[in-house]
Image (spheres, helix red, strand yellow):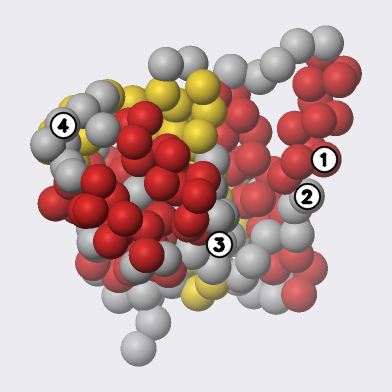
Amino acid sequence: MRVLLASTSPARLMLLRQAGIEPETTAPDVDEEAVIAAVEAAEGRTLAPDEHVLLLARRKAADVAARIADDDPSFDGVVIGGDSMFELDGEILGKPYTPEAATARWHSMRGRTGVLHSGHAMCRLSPGRDPHEAHAVAEASVTFSADMTDDEIDAYVASGEPLHVAGAFTIDSLGGPFIERVEGDPSTVVGMSLSTLRRLARELGVAWPDLWKTRD
């Protein structure tokens, strides 16, 4: 069975590969800021973090699923979309982009605990059948080392790694040694909760082992 990841995230691709899946990848054509702004304006409120990530995950999966259904009607498999946000004391922390922002972020996170919210959407496509979708949000709390020095923060920021990742940290690379504890599915912090994806596959009638090694 084919697996199409609606993302070009290296972390998500690596995560699925480590779990025995070799997905195809396609970047979703979704204007994330415009989607959120339109929904919030229509509903007259600010979306909570779990609503935010789930909305974007579903839009990404739906966009790629619709395109593959048109381009390759013989596609038989699943399309996976995801989105993540990090929350600290009620504040949403996205990608810092600049060294100055990343440094300030790490000074504020040092010795504290935040929550990584990860939205998941899976679409089941098969020839001659209507598409079906399942979705869910996974959360994991992340506690950062209290004894991380200013020099360590400067060195980590200088590596460039935290500039373009949600929350300004990773758990599976250079940032890992500065994280003391994760409560919840650790893969959630990498980019997607594998246990959540397995549950969504089961909801769609797909056995998880059927997704292993989908490409030669």
Which residue does the numbered mark 3 point to in the structure image?
7
SS category of the residue bearing label 1? helix
Which residue does the numbered mark 1 point to in the structure image?
34
Q: Earlier in the sequence, mark 4 or mark 1?
A: 1
> x%, y% of residue 118?
44, 37
> x%, y% of residue 69?
72, 65
SS category of the residue bearing label 2? loop
User: Which amino acid, mark 2?
Assistant: Asp
User: Which amino acid, mark 4?
Assistant: Ala
Q: Residue furthest bottom?
A: 216
Between label 3 and label 1, give the one nearer the viewer. Answer: 1
SS category of the residue bearing label 3? loop
Dot 1 alpha-carbon crowd within 10 angstroms: few under 14, some 14 to 19, many 20 or more: few
Q: Earlier in the sequence, mark 4 or mark 2?
A: 2
Residue 215 vs residue 10, the one in the foreground:
10
Mark 3–mark 2 CB contact (< 8 Å) = no
Dot 3 alpha-carbon crowd within 10 angstroms: few under 14, some 14 to 19, many 20 or more: many
Alpha carbon separation for disc pair 4 and 2 = 37 Å
Residue at screen point 28% across, 50% down: 153
| Residue 159 vertical position relative to residue 180 in the rendered view, above or below | below
Residue at screen point 21% across, 28% down: 111
Alpha carbon separation for disc pair 3 and 1 = 18 Å
Residue 199 vs residue 139, the one in the foreground:
139
Residue at screen point 50% across, 49% down: 100
Residue at screen point 51% across, 45% down: 101
Residue 157 vs residue 32, the one in the foreground:
157
The quarter of the rendered structure image containing the C terminus is bottom left
Which disc number belongs to residue 146?
A: 4
Which residue does the numbered mark 2 point to in the structure image?
31
| Residue 39 vertical position relative to residue 145 in the rendered view, above or below | above
Instruction: Determine if residue 140 is in view.
Output: no
User: Which amino acid, mark 1?
Assistant: Ala
